[in-house]
Amino acid sequence: MSSSLIFEVFSKYEPNNLLLKQAETEVLDEQLETHRLAKTLDRLRQLTLVWQVTKRPSPFAFPLLVERLNSRLSNESLLERVERMKQQWEKQ
């Protein structure tokens, strides 16, 4: 019997089951580390935001640009389009 099946049955037929609540708590506390996330968000809230205009996309924008390229129809593969984008950046 798989744990996902047990989770689905409890979720559907007995949503207030103590084992289900314990599993949810463990995931939030141990896997997602919500206490560390809360501390990080508090620290970020205290920082000053600096808006910097760039001539070309920064490395942090790369995943967004690839996602945008992936959603377009093209005869090129995604890898070819990313490589072409990389070459254009290197020329500038």
Image (spheres, rainbow, N blue to C red):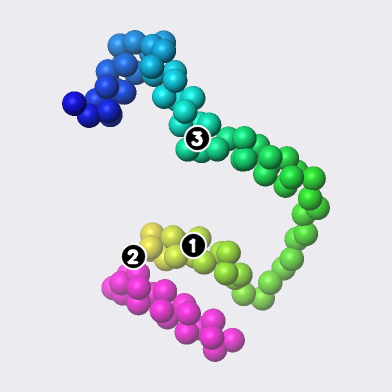
Amino acid type, callout 2 = Leu
Q: Which residue is mark 1?
A: 63
For the record, the magenta segment spans: 74-92
Q: Residue at x 68, y 40 (%)?
A: 39
x then y, percent, for residue 37: 61, 40
x then y, percent, for residue 38: 65, 37
Q: CA distance from mark 2 to mark 1?
A: 18 Å
Which marked residue is nearer to the observer: mark 1 or mark 3? 3
Task: Tell me the quarter of the image containing the C terminus.
Answer: bottom right
Direction from residue 34 to residue 8 in the image, left or right: left
* SS at circle 2: loop
Q: Which residue is mark 3?
A: 30
Q: CA distance from mark 2 to mark 3?
A: 41 Å
Q: Nearer the viewer, residue 20 or 71?
A: 20
Task: Tell me the quarter of the image containing the N terminus.
Answer: top left
Q: Residue 76 magenta-drawn?
A: yes
Direction from residue 54 to residue 69 in the image, left or right: left
Q: Which residue is mark 2?
A: 73
Q: CA distance from mark 1 to mark 3?
A: 28 Å
N-terminal-most mark, 2 or 1: 1
Q: Residue at x 50, y 35 (%)?
A: 30
The answer to whether the residue labelled 2 contacts the one labelled 1, judged by CB atoms less than 8 Å apart, is no
Amino acid type, callout 1 = Pro
The disc label shown at residue 22, or none:
none
Does residue 87 sit above or below 78 in this rendering? below
Amino acid type, callout 3 = Glu
Q: Quadrant of residue 68?
A: bottom left
Does residue 49 sit above or below 43 in this rendering? below
Decide: few, some or many residues near mark 1? Use Cα within 10 Å; few <14, some 14-19, many ≥20. Answer: few
